[in-house]
Image: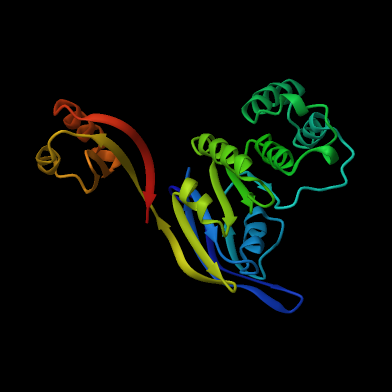
Amino acid sequence: MDKNILEVSNVSKEIGGKKILKNITFTCEDYTTLAIRGSNGSGKSTLLKILAGIYEPTSGVVNRGNRKVGYVTEHFPESLRFKLKEYLILTASFQNIPKQQIEEDLIKYIEMFNLQAHVNTPLKKCSKGTKQKVGIIQALMMKPDILLLDEPLTGLDSATQSELFYLLEKLKKQVTIIFTTHEEKMIESLADAIFSVESGEVLHNPQFRTLQKLIKVNFKDQSILRKLNPDQITYEGNTAFITVDTTKSDELLLALLNNNCSILEVKERREV
């Protein structure tokens, strides 16, 4: 599979005589965050279940090699009687993980996801956001190579969405992430590549996004900025907004400082 962690070839799926997916083909590289975009009913959730091995394709092949897959469903089970920590210990024990490792992982993830106040709270009394975090921790306890998230923003308020973006940004360095969504906000914040499906068919194969940096800077002489030849630049009075490829950003920042410009903000952005 070379650097591809996942290969999907001509996958179709029929359920109850209805064709849900039609000849889906794509690949995903290791340590990529891939967004599967599509409207409700487009087939993206069915595709994610096939990637997870929950559904078998009617035809076609999914090649994961020996990779482990963690799956987080859109709707967390509502009737579980366990407390938060009890549930995570139980689900981890199904994976034959040593008890000491389970305890060490729980300490790490409970702190990472800021759940210290909820470890002894019954799951049925937890908020949607807390349950979403529990679902992700459950999947991560498996030590997956691929983390699959089905519509992870469903039911979350804006503050919890922002917190989830931050957590997933940290996880991107540890695991390949594939998520379904019709929310452009999540795609903009996290996706390295975008795969589009509509009515069970491919609209666009994975399109990788160029990582860029947006630099906000105060300047005294506009001619200095023009000489630096940035990729894109707009002005608001004596403030400039410069978009530059990440590979060129350090050199440009140094040049700006050497020309007595004041750097106000630097942030990443992605463009297809």
Q: Residue at x 66, y 28 (%)?
A: 114
Horizontally, is 104 left or right of 30 in the view? right
Horizontally, is 47 left or right of 81 in the view? left
Instruction: Point out the residue furthest to the bottom here.
Output: 17
Instruction: Point out the residue furthest to the right here.
Output: 81
Horizontally, is 133 left or right of 179 in the view? right
Residue 8 point in image, percent of width and height = 54, 61
Q: Is residue 244 above or below residue 271?
A: above
Between 165 and 50, the residue placed more toward the observer is: 165
Figure quadrant of residue 237: top left
Q: Residue at x 52, y 54 (%)?
A: 35
Figure quadrant of residue 220: top left
Residue 19 point in image, percent of width and height = 66, 76
Work out whether residue 64 can be spotted. Answer: no
Residue 36 point in image, percent of width and height = 54, 58
Q: Residue at x 74, y 79 (%)?
A: 17
Residue 224 point in image, percent of width and height = 11, 37
